[in-house]
Image: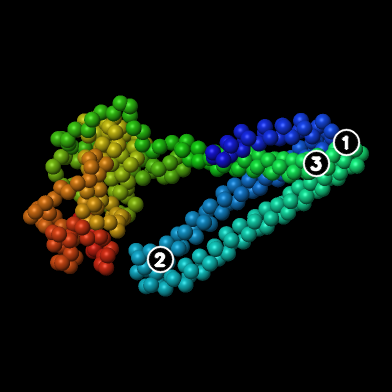
Amino acid sequence: MSSICWQFVTKPAFVNRFCDDSGRFSPLLAVLVALAALPQLVIQLKIGRQRFGLAFTLSADERRLFYYGHLLTSPYPAKEVRLFGLANYFLDQWRQLCATVHQAQRRQELRELRWSLFLELLATLVSTATFVVVVVQAFAGRLSLGDVTLYTNAVRGIQGALMGLVSAVSTLHEHTLFFATYEQVLALPSPVAAPAPARPVPPLRQGIELRHVSFRYSQAHPWVLQDVNLLIPAGQCLALVGLNGAGKTTLVKLLTRLYDPTAGQILWDGVDMREFDPEELRGRMGTVFQDFGRYAFRRRKTLLWARCSLRPMRPVFTGPRKRRVFTHCWPGCPKATRRCSAGSLAKMGMGWNCPGGSGKR
């Protein structure tokens, strides 16, 4: 961006000085050089729009391309890939998408190459025409031999200055197109609004109550929950049992304020959860989803992540308590890796995988 601003600062002054000097002996020369920059500007702006359109068109294919690469290289889907013999299918799909994306990019590069050749030819014609004008003026006795050299070099310099200015304008235009899309993404409404000011979240004393809660993810989607009334007493264990798609996971997302109810209220000791800051509310909860993430970091960090947003990450388990915690969380791991000195510092995924239940713990 700084180089673009520098082009806008320096190049117009240089162009203005050349037009003043060249206009004294040949206004045609100044007009010719100035008009030659217009096709360059139009073509560069067109190329920028084509690049933006191509990036927008190929975005879905490039995401699928990345996803197929993830399926072929990630260890988590490796069992199904090998069990069902999907490697060749995924590889064929990846190759087809690669060919599609590269072919579209190659066509765009060839178009840009043809336009670049046209612009180079135009610049050569302008240089030749200006040289002829200067030589004619010299034969007419209006310019000396030194003036011929001076104005010939000046034409080359002004062409470079105009090309730099055109490049800066076209680059800024192309960046503006991408930034406009970025602004549209930022303008999307948040599913959860943080109140200002937010009420502090007290420790749960009575319980969490759902009153006539209904929810759907958007107006185009069906209702996931409808008129749900539920009381979750503090300090008690409650199990939600239901068929697939009944809304159990969605209910947990509402309790943790990943979403707000479409209708109804969720009360924390009688206070609507919408009055709390979502981050502070989540800090009062411990949540593990069925599709939990597995991270290749030290085990101590994975335990502390649940509270790392509320206080600096530091050791909270020492001595015998530390051994009990890691023995409980990873009972299926080798004993050597559960020792106090190595258990908390050992990296997940280094030569072994924790069982699913141990990973949830």
Instruction: Give the number of marks.
Output: 3
Determine which quarter of the picture holds residue 285.
Answer: top left
Q: CA distance from mark 2 to mark 3?
A: 67 Å
Q: The residue under label 3 is which amino acid type?
A: Gly
Q: CA distance from mark 2 to mark 1?
A: 74 Å
Nearer the viewer's eye, disc 1 or disc 3? 3
x 54%, y 62%: residue:
97
- Would residue 332 be visible to someone looking at this image? no
Decide: few, some or many residues near mark 3? Use Cα within 10 Å; few <14, some 14-19, many ≥20: few
Left or right, 255 with reference to 64? left
Looking at the image, is mark 2 or mark 1 nearer the viewer?
Answer: 1
Crowding near pointer 2: few (<14 within 10 Å), some, many (20+)? few
| Residues at discs 1 and 3 in contact (Cβ within 8 Å) | no
The residue lying furthest to the right in this view is 140
User: Considering only vertical position in the picture, is 298 above or below 10?
Assistant: below
Name the amino acid, label 2. Thr
Q: In the rendered structure, are the residues bearing label 2 and label 1 in contact, judged by CB atoms less than 8 Å apart?
A: no
Mark 2: secondary structure: helix
Image height of 123 relative to 22, above or below: below
Which residue in the rendered view is the most extreme toward the left?
A: 320
Quadrant placement of the C terminus? bottom left
Image quarter of the N terminus: top right
Residue denoted by label 2: 73
Q: Which residue is mark 1?
A: 142
Residue 146 circle label: 3
Q: Is disc 1 placed on a helix, strand or loop?
A: loop
Q: CA distance from mark 1 to mark 3?
A: 12 Å
Q: Is residue 318 visible?
A: yes
Residue type, numbered disc 1: Arg
Q: Return the x and y of residue 228 as percentages of the image width and height.
A: 29, 40
**In the rendering, at what x and y percent does residue 93 appear?**
51, 66
